[in-house]
Image (cartoon, grey):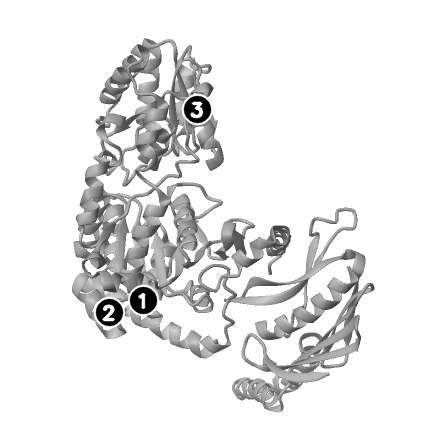
Amino acid sequence: MEDETFTDISGKSICLDCQSHSSFCREFTVSSPKVSIGKVMVYTCSVWLLAYAVFFLTQNTAVLSSAILITLVGMMFHIHFVKVDHETLLVIGSLGIQVSSSYASGREITTFIEMSKIKDIVINEAIYMHQIIYYLCVLLKDPSEPSAVSSVVPLFQSSKPRLNCLVKVYKSCQEILSKSQ
Amino acid sequence: MGQRKRVAAVKNPSSQRHSGAPAEATRVSNRKHNICMVSDFFYPNMGGVESHIYQLSQCLIEKGHKVVIATHAYGRRKGVRYLTNGLKVYYLPLQVMYNQSTATTCFHSLPLLRCVFVRERITVVHAHSSFSAMAHDALFHAKTMGLNTVFTDHSLFGFADVSSVLTNKLLTVSLCDTNHIVCVSYTSKENTVLRAALNPEIVSVIPNAVDPTDFTPDPSQRQDDRITIVVISRLVYRKGIDLLGGIIPELCLKHPDLHFLIGGEGPKRIVLEEVREKYQLHDRVRLLGALEHKDVHGVLVQGHIFLNTSLTEAFCMAIVEGASCGLQVVSTRVGGIPEVLPEDLITLCEPTVRSLCAGLETVIARQRSGSVPSPASIHACVQNLYTWRNVAERTEKVYDRVAGEEVLPLDRRLQRLRAHCGPVAGSIFALFAVLDFLFLLLLQWLVPDRIMDAAVDATGPQGLWRRETESKNEAYSKRAMKRAADRETL
């Protein structure tokens, strides 16, 4: 539908993509920038230089080959488990919310929360590392005890958008939720 | 005595500077401040400082200022919470070292406190209690960040022993470049000025207050076949619990209808338990343990006499609460206590067992003869002496004054530190100030101010809370949810 630039809490620019499939079904995608070649180069070079320094002192070639292995495995580990490419929130009124995050390698983790368990979606504040940030979360309820909040599912956990982006998502989510309840 | 003090307060130039310039005063008093109260002591911890911060904040919010409170995390209570009227409390995860006071390294609290100050757009940092390391840290960082600072001292200190020499030095360092200091009584002001070698001009006296509607007399709760003495304090050495341990057997022996009701918890409880055991007074001395603030009234109204045995006290809230409930007050003559109540409402004694017993005897005799004023008349006397609105008004004047003052830039701050705090401590803390400044620059480079989200105001001129409370149910459910969500914070 529209494309605006937002930043995450550390100042990197991220993309928010809102798609309205119908009046009660919307999809929000927050995508972080791709892994930059420069950063990969810097990490690889520093590991290799370190390895070469150790090799220079010990004259052991195993150090060099293990350095190559470490960089390869490290990079694979990073794109498979750490680096999240984009996170998607799919809100379907009367049905539920689907949250999925896909890693740079293409691996995708998807969870679905059905509407009967959802109490609300709110923006909350939390202390994260040495900062205090806003985040969007889904409040879950136990169907047997509808007035209490049983647990909280934070959304956009790895991209951590700033407040202006969260407010936008929050407002359109509330539109759908208020219609379906 | 209370009246005399009020006159003095009006004459006091430091707290009333604006009265000389009415035009300026009206202009400045319209200004709204963004205030951050910082102290290690806040609810759920109970005590005088905690309720002072809470009540003062509530009255300032009522006057249209924005107030947030920063304290350390208490057990599982961490993150951001909202209290009544949108009072926002940050429970920051800082390590607690001793007696609910955080460890101080001068630096480690800077990132979080900076985050609070920046995102709430704080203009005045108000730190409470000299026992609180976090308060001193906050003052230190606020000055580095160029914010105006106010400090409220709630306690009295000695000068002689090693620990007070050290804390006094620390206080000197911490207060020498603070904009304004507030003390709770004239005794406390004298004490603070001497301890921290301050200019008395920048020290104001604003007493504590009690909520008179919370402490109303209710004589029907009293049992008329006996005389009950109520003691409510933390059971620690400073509160003179050893004296209490001496008084109890002596008086119980003389007066068979005398009962003691003791509320509070602490390390000295064992003293009272021993006395109770030794003299077989289980039916006459009741130890109630820790009391919640809401239960204090229920205990106070059961008594005839309120006893305070403190050895040091800057301003005793408990005796005002006791008098407000219509009790006869007997107290030690220490610190700021003689300033607190008019002479006809309080019996002052020396802090010895003999003097306290004599004082209690006269009050008991008066009670028996029925020559004491009625609880309602005592309450009427006390209820307008100390109100939180008055405290907030006077504090507001301090903020107005402070907001017009400049914060010392780094070079002049270093000069001040070295000139005021002695060559050794001064130089050390000047070095700390420089390091703190460098650390701040590093943080500003890592996380610039502009990428920190400004917090949504709950209170203050653009406060959203009032609008929300209009549809009360909705607001309540929102708050409940928020609270629940807080419990799960990262």
Helix, strand or loop at label 1? It is helix
Q: Is residue B429 positioned above or below B19 on the image?
A: below
Residue B160 visible in the displayed image: no
Question: On the same chain: label 1 and label 3?
Answer: yes
Going by the numbered disc 2, the residue's amino acid type is: Arg
Q: Is residue B112 positioned above or below A50 on the image?
A: above
Residue B112 visible in the displayed image: yes
Label 1: few (<14), some or many (≥20) within 10 Å? many
Q: What residue sits 33% from the left and 47% below the top?
A: B391
- Judging by the rendered image, the residue that carries numbered circle 3 is B218
Q: Are marks 1 and 3 in contact (CB under 8 Å)?
A: no
Report how far apart the C-alphas of labels 1 and 3 lie in the structure: 49 Å
The quarter in which the C terminus of chain B is drawn is: bottom right
Q: Is residue B470 positioned above or below B225 on the image?
A: below
Q: Residue under mark 2: which chain is it in?
A: B
- Judging by the rendered image, the residue that carries numbered circle 1 is B143
Helix, strand or loop at label 2? It is helix
Helix, strand or loop at label 3? It is loop
